[in-house]
Image (tube, rainbow, N blue to C red):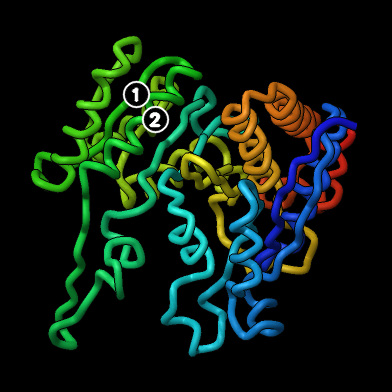
Amino acid sequence: MGDIVRIGVLHGDGIGPEIVPAAVEVAAKALQRNDIGVEWIELPFGAAAIDSHGTAAPSETLAALDELDLWVLGPHDSASYPTEFRGQLTPGAVIRKRYNLFANLRPAKALDAARAMAPGIDLLIARENSEGLYADRNMAVGSGEFMPTPDVALAVGVITRAASERIAREAFTWARRRRGKVTIVHKANVLTMTTGLFRDACLDVARDFPDVEVSQEHVDAMAAHLVRRAADFDVVVTENLFGDILSDLAAELAGSLGTAASINCSATKAMAQAAHGAAPDIAGQGSANPIAMISSTAMLLAWQGQRSGDERLAAAAASIDSALARAITAGVATRDLGGTASTATFAQAVLDGL
């Protein structure tokens, strides 16, 4: 056996304890077949951690993550937490802010042309993940939402040049690995100062990537273009709120939000986190779709492979993607995709494909 990679595991809530183990099992086999050992470090997180530690993101979990570069994070269902926890940062937000995971990378690729509304879609949305209008990301202390009276609610949106340039550089770097095109999405015709600053910062970064083709779209037009001609786009870079909405749209065009992979990363740390939620209505039934979690974990390995230069990690990630495609092509599907496979049955089909 070759080198050992250490990866944290946080199962989360709802369907998390079903889909995260499926992703871990698949990744472990892919790594083994590429002569890489793995140490999985399970850490308390979410509702179970509230029961055992009195908080959804225990200090021992955060201390362990301080020593790790990679982890797999299951979904959280903070809306169902006891009342005293609902006004706090979600546990995912605690982790994202602590490690400054500024980039949310969300691919959308049609895994099954018959189920995809846009069969040719194969794009990556690079979503700025540290600021914008989201109330947990725009103030050093407290929330960016406030109510001067019970009938008036205000929100503060924050766009900075530094954060905009940082996500732009990430997007252009990924475009060089893909098809060499970046689309900058903004709303500078209306939000002139804020998203205008985002657009201009991205265009400034583009000068350092003369080999990458650059275009720009207003966010409303971009939504329409995705529906009509999604296959024309390669890497899409945008601010936080727009990226959240467009990535869900792109995921549905590719087949299902249940297949939507995602990683959140900084320059030095990354976590795999499926784009979907905890789906508490189907938790414990063994019917959850593990594709997004498995694919997110493959992305995590690919990210580490690019960062470290270890081609074995990239090969492990590619083998997972190929095994997923084979299982889907063979007609194995969970209930949300019109099939009858259980979470475990689908995961086994992917393992067999490896």
Identify the element where label 1 is drawn: strand
Q: Earlier in the sequence, mark 2 or mark 1?
A: 2
> As displayed, is residue 74 above or below residue 127?
below
Q: Amino acid at mark 2?
A: Ala
> As displayed, is residue 125 above or below residue 146?
above
Q: Is residue 27 left or right of residue 262?
A: right
> As displayed, is residue 208 above or below residue 147?
above
How packed mark 2 is, by other alpha carbons closer than 10 Å (few <14, some 14-19, many 20 or more), is many
Q: Which residue position holds label 2?
A: 171
161 and 222: which one is in front? 161
Q: Is residue 33 left or right of residue 93?
A: right
Q: Quarter-wise, where is residue 308 in the image?
A: top right
Cα separation between marks 2 and 1: 7 Å
Q: Is residue 206 left or right of residue 251?
A: left
Residue 85 in the image: state x and y as whole percent.
50, 83
Q: Nearer the viewer, mark 2 or mark 1?
A: 2
At horizontal 49% and vertical 29% (from top left) the residue drawn is 118
Q: Which residue position holds label 1?
A: 182
Q: Amino acid at mark 1?
A: Val
